[in-house]
Amino acid sequence: MKKGRSSLLAILAVAVVVALAIGARLAVWTGAEHQSASSGNGAIGGAFTLVDHQGRTVTDQDFRGRWLLIYFGYTFCPDVCPTSLTLMTSALDRLDEVQRAKVTPVFVTVDPVRDTPEVMAGYVSAFTADMVGMTGSEEQVAAAMKAFKVYAAKVKSDDPTAYTVDHSSILYLIGPDGRFVQHFPHGVGVEDIAAGLKKHLK
């Protein structure tokens, strides 16, 4: 009886040690993940080469000294993209004049086949005059999406020209040094986005 009880206690002790080890590992992992998402350590974002809505080749270096608020989507998007870009511009409208002058809103397509510079020009002009639309070759856009960890997948359609694209919906704030600062996931309200921007634009 005593032997059985001792064995049970030994098993429980091992289980506790294993649980503590797993818990510690998870704490370290989530802590590192949080740090990379909030400290701008380069885990998200980076170098890119794209084509703006005026047909000019641009890189991340062209925006040094500017804050960027970036959204990835596509012009044929029926709902999420126009809603998110409206949210972006509404948040920017809540900044004071000095803060607003520091930020360039950027819309990067995930559908470069249909979103030519001309198409992008007409689309971004509907939101705010200083929004920069970006497209490029499929390889250039794919590289930018990879840098920002953007998900996008074409939804099959009987009409090859009328497809939709499933994609992540996130606003990325990039600092004047080109490093990731903060992201605003889908569902965050305009006041919270504006407050987050103001915090960094003091």
Image (cartoon, rainbow, N blue to C red):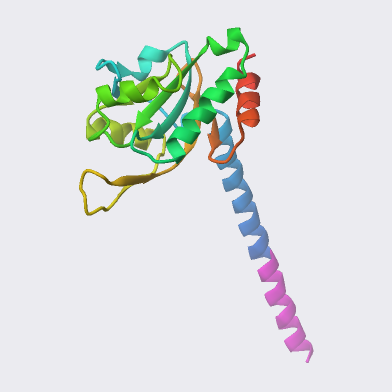
Q: Main secondary structure of the magenta part?
A: helix
- Who's the residue at 29% across and 23% down the image? 49
- From what the image shows, is residue 178 above or below residue 27? above
Q: In which quadrant of the rendered image does the N terminus lie?
A: bottom right
- Who's the residue at 33% across and 22% down the image? 122
- From what the image shows, is residue 166 above or below residue 73? below
Give the camera-side residue of 53 and 22: 53
Q: In which quadrant of the rendered image does the C terminus lie?
A: top right
On screen, residue 141 versus residue 70, left or right, reads left
Q: How many marks?
A: 0
- Residue 181 can be seen in this image: no
Residue 39 percent location from the top left of the image? 57, 29
Q: Splitting the image into 4 quarters, where does residue 147 fall?
A: top left
- Who's the residue at 32% across and 46% down the image? 164
Q: Is 2 covered by the magenta stretch?
A: yes
Q: Splitting the image into 4 quarters, where does residue 9 fall?
A: bottom right
- Residue 94 can be seen in this image: yes
Give the camera-side residue of 97 and 176: 97
Residue 185 percent location from the top left of the image? 54, 38
Q: Is 8 covered by the magenta stretch?
A: yes
- From what the image shows, is residue 123 above or below residue 150? above
Q: Which residues are the magenta region?
A: 1-16
Identify the residue at the far bottom of this view. Answer: 1
Residue 154 percent location from the top left of the image? 30, 47
Residue 132 percent location from the top left of the image? 38, 19
